[in-house]
C-alpha cells in the first residue's frame, strides 16, 4: 500500500488552510502528506498567520520532505480571489475538484488515505450543485451503495443509521434492510480498520425509553429488535435497542467498541461533548480510507490564528494508523 496520504484544503475561506499550515509545519509523520490546494492560497494564508512555510510541488517521484516548515502541494487553482472568512460560490467547484482528485488518487492506489478539512455545504449549493456532504459525495464518486458515518473521540465511537435527514423523515428511513446493511458494514470495518476481532456494538432505540414496550412507538418492536436478533444469530455481538439517555453511560460504554445511533442528533451531541475539537469523522463502507475533522469552517476564526488544528492532527494520525 502507498505510504502517501492526501489532504484536501476544505473551503478556501474557512479554517481549512489555517489548520493545515499549523499541523503540517509543526509535526512529522511516518507517511508522506500531500495537500491538494491552490499554492497561492496557502502562501497568502501563511503570510496572514505569520507562519514560515516552504511549498514543494508534488509529483509521483517526489521524495518525502522532512523539514518541519515544508509542505508538499498538488497544485490546483481557485477561480476567484480568496478572502479569509468570506465565502465565495465561485470557488465551490475548486472544493469539489480537491475531493475528486483525492478520492480518485486513493482508488488508483497512489494514496493510501484521504483526510478532509471542513467545507461549507451551503456555498456549494449556492453554486448550483446539489450537495449534502462529504459522505454522500464520496459514496457517489466511489460507487458505494451505503456509506456509514462514524465519529470517534478517545475510546467512544458513534456511527449513524441515518445522517443528514430531517427528523420527520427518520422513522420511515429506519428499515430492517438498512439496519442490517449498516450493522454489517460497521462490524466489518471495526474488524478490518480498527483490528477488533469481535466488536461489541450498542444500538440505540429510536423512541424515548426505546419505545417503552410499544407505548412510545413501535419501531423497536416491529423493526429494530427483530433485525438485531437476526444479526446476533449470525454471530455478531450486539446489545440493544437501549434507551439513548442511559446507553451513553459508563455502565454500557465501558464494555462496547461502538454505538449505533438512529439519527444525527441522537448520537453526535454526546460524542462532541466528550471530544469536540479532538474528535474524528471516518466514513465506513467506502473502498478507500477517509477521515475528517469534527468541526465546520469557523469563518470567524479564519486568518486569525485562533483555530485549533487538534482535530485535523487526530484525523491524520488515524489515517496513518489505519493505512499503516
Image (cartoon, rainbow, N blue to C red):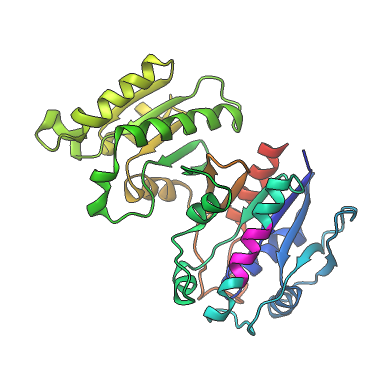
Q: Nearer the viewer, residue 256 or 164?
A: 164
Q: Residue furthest left?
A: 215
Q: Is residue 209 left or right of residue 252?
A: left
Q: Examine the rendered structure and indicate whether residue 55 appears above or below residue 115.
A: below
Question: Could you tell whether 134 is left or right of 36 in the image?
Answer: left
Q: Position of residue 214 (x, y in %)?
A: 12, 31
* 189 relative to 229 in the view: left or right: right
* Number of marks in picture: 0
Residue at far front of view? 143
Could you say which is closer to the camera, residue 229 or residue 258? 229
Q: Residue at x 67, y 56 (%)?
A: 102
- For image coordinates 26% across by 23% down, the residue present is 226
Dominant SS of magenta comes to helix
What's the residue at 78%, 42% (across, down)? 2
The quarter of the picture where the N terminus appears is: top right
Is 197 placed left or right of 133 in the picture? right
Give the x, y percent position of residue 248: 34, 36
Q: Is residue 231 above or below residue 95?
A: above
Of residues 173 and 197, the one nearer the viewer is 173
Quarter holding the C terminus is top right
- What range of the chain is rendered magenta? 94-101
Amino acid at each position: 500500500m502507498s505510504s502517501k496520504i492526501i489532504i484536501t484544503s476544505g473551503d478556501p475561506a474557512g479554517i481549512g488552510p489555517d489548520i493545515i499550515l499549523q499541523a503540517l509545519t509543526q509535526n512529522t509523520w511516518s507517511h508522506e502528506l500531500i495537500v491538494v490546494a491552490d499554492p497561492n492560497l496557502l502562501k497568502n494564508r501563511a503570510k496572514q498567520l505569520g507562519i514560515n512555510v516552504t511549498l514543494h510541488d508534488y509529483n509521483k517521484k517526489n521524495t518525502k520532505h522532512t523539514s518541519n516548515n515544508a509542505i508538499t502541494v498538488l497544485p490546483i487553482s481557485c477561480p476567484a480571489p480568496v478572502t479569509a472568512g468570506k465565502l465565495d460560490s465561485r470557488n465551490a467547484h475548486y472544493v469539489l475538484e480537491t475531493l475528486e482528485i483525492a478520492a480518485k488518487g486513493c482508488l488508483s492506489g497512489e494514496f493510501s488515505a484521504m483526510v478532509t478539512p471542513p467545507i461549507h455545504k451551503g456555498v456549494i449549493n449556492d453554486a448550483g450543485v446539489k450537495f449534502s456532504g462529504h459522505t454522500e459525495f464520496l459514496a457517489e464518486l466511489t460507487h458505494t451503495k451505503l456509506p456509514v458515518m462514524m465519529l470517534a473521540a478517545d475510546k467512544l465511537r458513534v456511527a449513524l443509521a441515518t445522517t443528514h435527514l430531517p427528523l420527520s423523515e427518520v422513522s420511515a428511513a429506519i428499515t430492517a434492510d438498512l439496519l442490517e446493511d449498516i450493522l454489517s458494514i460497521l462490524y466489518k470495518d471495526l474488524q478490518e480498520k480498527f483490528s477488533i476481532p469481535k466488536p461489541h456494538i450498542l444500538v440505540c432505540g429510536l423512541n424515548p425509553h426505546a419505545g417503552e414496550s410499544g407505548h412510545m412507538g413501535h419501531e423497536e418492536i416491529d423493526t429494530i429488535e427483530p433485525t438485531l436478533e437476526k444479526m446476533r444469530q449470525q454471530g455478531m455481538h450486539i446489545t440493544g435497542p437501549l434507551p439513548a439517555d442511559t446507553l451513553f453511560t459508563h455502565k454500557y460504554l465501558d464494555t462496547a467498541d461502538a454505538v449505533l445511533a438512529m439519527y444525527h442528533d441522537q448520537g453526535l451531541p454526546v460524542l462532541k461533548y466528550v471530544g469536540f475539537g479532538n474528535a474524528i469523522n471516518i466514513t465506513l463502507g467506502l473502498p478507500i480510507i477517509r477521515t475528517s475533522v469534527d468541526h465546520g469552517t469557523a469563518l470567524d476564526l479564519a486568518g486569525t490564528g485562533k483555530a485549533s488544528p487538534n482535530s485535523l492532527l487526530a484525523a491524520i494520525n488515524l489515517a496513518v494508523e489505519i493505512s499503516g
